[in-house]
Image (cartoon, rainbow, N blue to C red):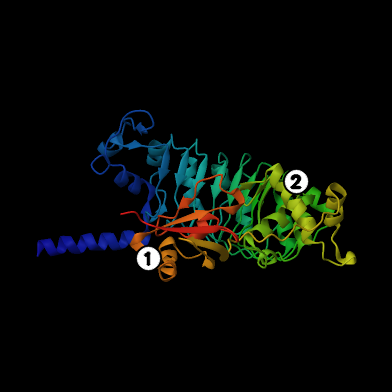
């Protein structure tokens, strides 16, 4: 009976913990308890927590790394702030993704006690609708990298955070179902990299706001948004993203070459990713790459692959030839620019490089000579079967030789002795000779 009551109480405690969530301190104590985690020493192993006046036996023995990963641990609260400070004072990277934080205030309590934190990952915490009390964002001020994927955090909350993080360099806002971008009165000039993939951004009028919010952006990752076009004049594009070096537009909705050419107006753009867009679907892989390279003269890396000088010249020559059959009034300006560089190139000769399928050869056996048509896809063994009724020799009693007439008799005849080898691999052509002799006893 006593055991049943203890089990019931234990189950109730677990149910309450599941309902209320767990604290960061609880999870650290469990995960890094020496009884559950091997005690490590040496470079890179972490630090040993020193005894404090009211130190617990567990706290005194914990050995925590400076990169702390606490993913999917059911954490919703900070716990005792003094213990957070004792455990995490040395931590520089903290991954709290897939937990149960619903209150920015609890996250702020944690960060207040981790003074050297550089990286924070809050992905997939249910933070929609939550906000910070005045002054609460100051705890985030030391961050350089912040990940808020699939948190459905509002733009107002994003701006509250970025205004308090003076050296923020990387921001991740993927999978937040953003249909629009809300401007802020205060931009974030320190941001260099923005990941905003897998949202619902369709209109360029929303995307352009990112240039106003983050004026020194060097990398913009927009993959898996349905951006349909780039409506912006040249001078405006140059001012919007003056430092942009890399852009990812994978699986966007771009469907005309004019939109691709507008990427040339970003003065420092060198790296572009453009796979999976409707415009390029009708082309072969080589056509896609060559036509895109030809449209983007300053790009040095396309879809992750370096564009060499030789490849660029091949692509630009291909572009000219590709448009030779277009009516003069439909030729794009890029065609005329490239013709000024390379001249109006002639079409390439259409050379069929496929191997011949058959050849007319001269068959010699004994004192006899016959004309014979060979199917070159067949093997040497097949040829011997074909010759058997003509030369009146069993397959295992004949030797077959090939003579290349173009070389005359400068070389000795080549014996065809490998039964599985295809005839076309010998480069047999019309007019060559096949010689059959009986095997000597």
The answer to whether residue 117 is left or right of residue 300 is left
Please, which residue is most extreme toward the bottom here?
389
Q: Which dot, 2 or 1, sits closer to the camera? A: 1
Compare residues 316 and 439 and report the one nearer the observer: 439
Which image quadrant for residue 67? top left
The answer to whether residue 183 is left or right of residue 81 is right
Q: Residue at x 56, y 63 (%)?
A: 361
Q: Residue at x 44, y 50 (%)?
A: 96
Q: Is residue 55 visible?
A: no
Which image quadrant for residue 429? bottom right
Check the image and report above or below for 244 versus 351.
above
Q: Is residue 172 visible?
A: yes
Mark 1 residue element: loop
The answer to whether residue 2 is left or right of residue 95 is left
Q: Residues within 10 Å of mark 2 (few under 14, many from 20)?
A: some
Please, which residue is most extreme toward the right here?
329
Q: Which mark is residue 307?
A: none
Compare residues 8 and 287 and report the one nearer the observer: 287
Nearer-N-terminus badge (2/1): 2
Compare residues 381 and 255 and report the one nearer the observer: 381
- Quadrant occupied by the C terminus: bottom left
Report the residue marked by disc 2.
298
Check the image and report above or below for 201 versus 193.
below
Q: Residue at x 71, y 51 (%)?
A: 213
> x and y percent of residue 215 in the render?
73, 46
Report the residue marked by disc 1.
393
Which image quadrant for residue 65? top left
> x and y percent of residue 173 in the render?
58, 55
Mark 2 residue element: loop
């Amino acid at each position: 009976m006593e055991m049943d009551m203890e089990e019931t109480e234990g189950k109730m405690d677990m149910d309450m913990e599941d309902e209320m969530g767990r604290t960061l301190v609880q999870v650290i104590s469990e995960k890094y308890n020496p009884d559950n985690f091997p005690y490590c020493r040496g470079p890179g192993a972490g630090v040993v927590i020193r005894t404090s006046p009211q130190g617990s036996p567990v706290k005194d023995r914990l050995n925590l790394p400076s990169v702390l990963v606490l993913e999917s641990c059911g954490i919703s609260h900070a716990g005792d702030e003094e213990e957070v400070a004792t455990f995490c004072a040395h931590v520089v990277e903290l991954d709290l993704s897939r937990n149960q934080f619903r209150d920015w205030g609890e996250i702020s309590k944690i960060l207040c006690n981790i003074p050297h934190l550089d990286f924070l990952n809050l992905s997939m915490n249910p933070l929609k609708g939550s906000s910070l009390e005045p002054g609460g964002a100051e705890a985030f001020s030391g961050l350089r990298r912040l990940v808020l994927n699939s948190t459905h955090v509002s733009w107002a909350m994003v701006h509250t955070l970025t205004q308090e993080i003076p050296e923020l360099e990387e921001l991740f806002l993927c999978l937040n179902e953003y249909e629009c971008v809300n401007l802020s009165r205060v931009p974030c000039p320190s941001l260099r990299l923005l990941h905003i993939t897998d949202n619902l951004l369709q209109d360029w009028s929303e995307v352009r706001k990112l240039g106003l919010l983050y004026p020194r952006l060097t990398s913009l990752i927009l993959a898996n948004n349905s951006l349909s076009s780039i409506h912006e004049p040249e001078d405006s594009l140059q001012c919007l993203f003056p430092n942009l070096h890399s852009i990812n537009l994978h699986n966007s909705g771009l469907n005309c070459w004019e939109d691709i050419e507008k990427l040339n107006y970003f003065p420092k753009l060198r790296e572009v990713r453009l796979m999976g867009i409707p415009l390029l679907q009708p082309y072969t892989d080589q056509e896609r790459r060559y036509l895109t390279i030809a449209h983007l003269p300053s790009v040095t890396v396309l879809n992750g692959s370096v564009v060499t000088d030789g490849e660029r010249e091949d692509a630009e020559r291909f572009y000219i030839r590709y448009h030779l059959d277009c009516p003069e009034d439909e030729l794009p300006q890029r065609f005329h620019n490239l013709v000024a560089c390379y001249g109006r190139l002639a079409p390439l000769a259409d050379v069929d490089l496929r191997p011949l399928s058959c050849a007319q050869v001269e068959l010699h056996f004994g004192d006899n000579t016959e004309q014979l048509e060979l199917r070159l896809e067949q093997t040497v063994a097949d040829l011997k079967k074909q010759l058997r009724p003509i030369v009146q020799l069993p397959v295992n009693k004949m030797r077959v030789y090939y003579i290349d007439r173009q070389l005359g008799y400068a070389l000795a005849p080549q014996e065809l002795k490998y039964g599985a080898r295809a005839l076309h691999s010998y480069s047999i052509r019309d007019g060559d000779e096949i010689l059959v002799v009986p095997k000597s006893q």
